[in-house]
Image (cartoon, rainbow, N blue to C red):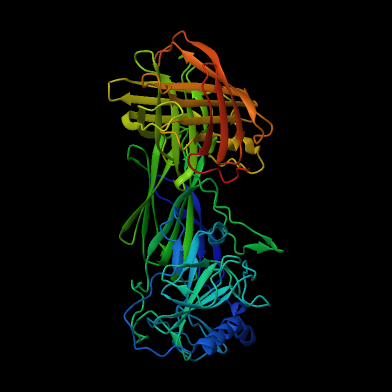
Amino acid sequence: MKCIPILAASIALFAGAAAAQERATLRGLLEPTAADAVADVERASLVADLEAQERAYAAAHGAPAPKAVQAANLAWPLRAREGFAGFDYQAATYFVDHDRRNPGFVQDYACGERSYDVAGYNHGGTDYVLWPFAWRMMDRGDIAVVAAAGGTLVARRDGEFDRNCEFRGSATTPNAVSIRQDDGLTARYLHFRRGSVTALPIGARVEAGDVLGLVGSSGPSSVPHLHFELNHALGGVVDPRAGACNPEPERWIVAQPYERPRIMMLATHAAEPAFVDCGVADGVPVHEQAHERRRFARGETLHAFVAFGDHRRGRVATFELRQPDGEVFARWQHDLADEDTPRDFYAGTAWSWEHVLPSDAPAGRWILHADFAGKAYEHAFVVGAGPNPDQPGLSGSWANAATDAQGLLLDLQADFFEPGIGLAFGGWFTWAPAAAPAWYTIQGEVREDADASTMPIYRTEFGAFDAPDPTTTHAVGNATLRFEDCSHGSLEYAFVDGRSGTIPLTRLLANVRCSRDGDADAAGQDSRALHSGAWADPSNSGQGLLFDLDTVQGVLFAAWYTFAPPNAPRSQRWYTLQAPLPGDLGVPADIAIFETQGGRFDAASTTTTRLVGTARLAFHSCTAATLAYQFDDGRAGTLDLVRIGRAPPACGS
């Protein structure tokens, strides 16, 4: 359960004929020092609480009977959160020590030396260290610990400090879980993040794959990791990995090779990635700053970053920066044998190379490509393009000033599918070719690593105003959305009926929180703007509203996408709503309802806009609102609105 401090060294590298002299940063694991030794008294207290709970459970329920050797039954004990973007997230550093002598006599299951011992103790498990950016992964809760096999929860501990960076001292008790498996073995999982350990009671049934907690650095630990160990009912360590120096059978369902050379992360960064050796300083958490970015301006400096797993001298990696047309901008190789490193092998290393983009660099989607250990890896980024489209800051009202009374309201939900891939939903209010009111919706992915987003155009028909009448929605074309900056963009459209063109878009209201990189923090900002987005009454079919609450100009604007009244011929209708932005969104506020007539699809025209009613709007939370309306023609009612999609994380009530 011991993890080794990270070794860091800066080394100059030459990246190839197309690149200049650069700097690379090596991060290495498996560099033991004498100060890491766990004293006998500290070791005794390390699992004393778990052992006491295990004995208490056995006394109350009986010890498990020894069972015959079973077939492999252990599933992988870690799980990345949905949307985790890396190729891998853990490096196996230390295995079980099979040489019972100590200290100074080490032998792992493959007869190698990837283990450790100290006076009175031989390492009894396998350590899986988060890599790279271990502290960032821990802080974000990226990696969960899950049960490797079914059984009964017999011990658990939580509440211990979880940002330890050393092995000696008083913080020797980890947050941990023990499970008596159905095969009679006891599995221990150590070093959880504080507050994450399962709340299941002792004696509860646990199935393989059930979440037990999050990886942390509690107890004797220098970096966030999982220590997993198996023990016989009557005592004695069980190594689940079979090898030349472990005659026991393989217990993992999917056996892992002794060395698994791979690239774990390939990325581009705006500055040198800032690893930290310790996640706390003077009692205050220290957070890693990766400076990751997928969008760069011409002339900017980018850092091409790679993290290796099971990195050994002689294994050559080849890298290329490829332009949008496929031409290679830079090519270089890397071999640990060429570096001044003290070891031939590391469970994990990380390097970065600096590249300055030319002032005339081709705009578009670039690729950072790598070949290593017989496998190809790619990371896409964009040069010379507009702002990151995967950000809520681009939500709002957009229109072409040259075409009167038609526009597009957008709801951008960042990272909806996974980090770097969001969801765009838009309501396009316009006119049919016959000058009748018409509206369309667009919906699809927006990607941080793309300079344009193409998605279907939909038309919804046969509904009735504020009624549950069934509707039909079908695709009628495709749209491509681009942004030049936070206030200008374009919508290119192509309908199946032959209409096509490009609409230049300008933001109608002020930019509240859009930024080039999409990293403007919503925390501390006026939360009223976070109520912008798509809303609908679930009792109505195929109709709803898109709100734009602009806290800079103090304006509330909305488009209402609906249909003609039930007693009229079935056709689409849309209205716009506008009012000063209320100070308290929870208090019902009056909003004017307008109707526009006389326009032409994507063309200048003479239109008339008139007031046709009023509404009272109140937001009850970030996901619920009420709109009571009164039209001059006598229509009146109330819409019980819910947000379509998820609320922004920083949204207040």
- Determine whether 364 is above or below 130 in the image: above
Q: Along the horizontal axis of the image, is 224 left or right of 565?
A: right
Viewer can see residue 139: yes
Q: In the visual, does 370 lie left or right of 173?
A: left
Q: Is residue 483 left or right of residue 169?
A: left
In this rendered view, identify the residue nearer to me: 153 or 126: 153
Residue 513 position in % (x across, y down)? 59, 35
The x, y position of residue 506, in whole percent, is 51, 23
Give the residue displayed 48% in from the left and 57% down from the top.
351
In the orientation shown, which residue stands out farthest toward the right? 282
Quarter of the image that includes the C terminus:
top right
Vertically, is 397 above or below 345? Answer: above
In the rendered image, residue 342, in percent from the top left (x then y), is placed at 50, 70
Q: Is residue 516 visible?
A: no
| Vertical relation: 40 (above or below) 393 | below
The residue shown at (45%, 78%) is 95
The image quadrant of residue 459 is: top left
Q: Is residue 632 above or below residue 85?
A: above
Measuring from the top left, give residue 223's x and y in whole percent. Answer: 56, 68
